[in-house]
Image (cartoon, grey):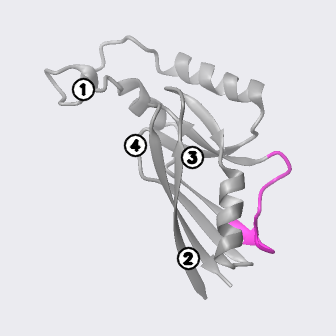
């Protein structure tokens, strides 16, 4: 069995953003030479998470609006208060929204490509940008 570890950088442009990273994952798989196995994608950040869903503009806007309703801006979160936290970013909403998702996804690889459903993509959900984000991709297989 062969393994391959790769780093991937994603530069985000706004505070909250959904980015389809499926093409970059596919490129990494192709470069690894692994034809059949698994790829694990891991976000090294607490406010940038991963999900598998449809990469359709209206749906991505709906997800953003949903997050805004579930975790409201402007509430007196302790993480934003210097009395309770040393964080100066005022990003409690970003951390709270991130708990709704995962920091990693695991995908099968078949014939040198990630196995996804017809409408599925791997999305990076930026919740506290703009920033440069680092993802680790671990491939295992033959």
Give the residue pinned by disc 1: 88
Q: Residues within 10 Å of mark 1 (few under 14, many from 20)?
A: few
* Label 2 – label 1 distance at C-alpha: 37 Å
* Label 3 crowd bin: few (<14), some (14–19), many (20+), radius 10 Å: many
- Neighbourhood count class around disc 4 (C-alpha, 10 Å): few under 14, some 14–19, many 20 upward: some
Disc 2 on helix, strand or loop? Answer: strand
Residues shaded magenta: 108-119
Q: Which mark is residue 46?
A: 4
Of labels 2 and 4, the one closer to you: 2
Q: Quadrant of residue 125?
A: top right
Q: From the viewer's perspective, is residue 9 above or below residue 132?
A: below
**Mark 2, residue position:** 4
Circle nearer the N terminus (2, 4): 2
Comes first in the chain, label 3 or label 2: 2
Q: Is residue 64 left or right of residue 85?
A: right
Residue under label 3: 50
């Amino acid at each position: 069995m062969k393994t391959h570890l790769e780093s991937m950088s994603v530069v985000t442009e706004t505070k909250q953003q959904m980015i389809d990273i499926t093409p970059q994952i596919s490129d990494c798989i192709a470069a690894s030479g692994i034809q059949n196995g698994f790829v694990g994608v891991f976000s090294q950040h607490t406010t940038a998470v991963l999900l598998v869903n449809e990469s359709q503009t209206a749906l991505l806007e709906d997800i953003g609006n949903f997050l805004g309703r579930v975790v409201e801006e402007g509430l007196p979160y302790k993480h934003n208060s210097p009395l309770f936290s040393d964080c100066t970013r005022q990003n409690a909403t970003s951390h709270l929204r991130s708990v709704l998702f995962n920091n990693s996804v695991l995908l099968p690889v078949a014939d040198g490509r990630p196995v996804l459903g017809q409408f599925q993509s791997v999305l990076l959900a930026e919740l506290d940008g703009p920033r440069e984000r680092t993802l680790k991709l671990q491939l295992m297989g033959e």
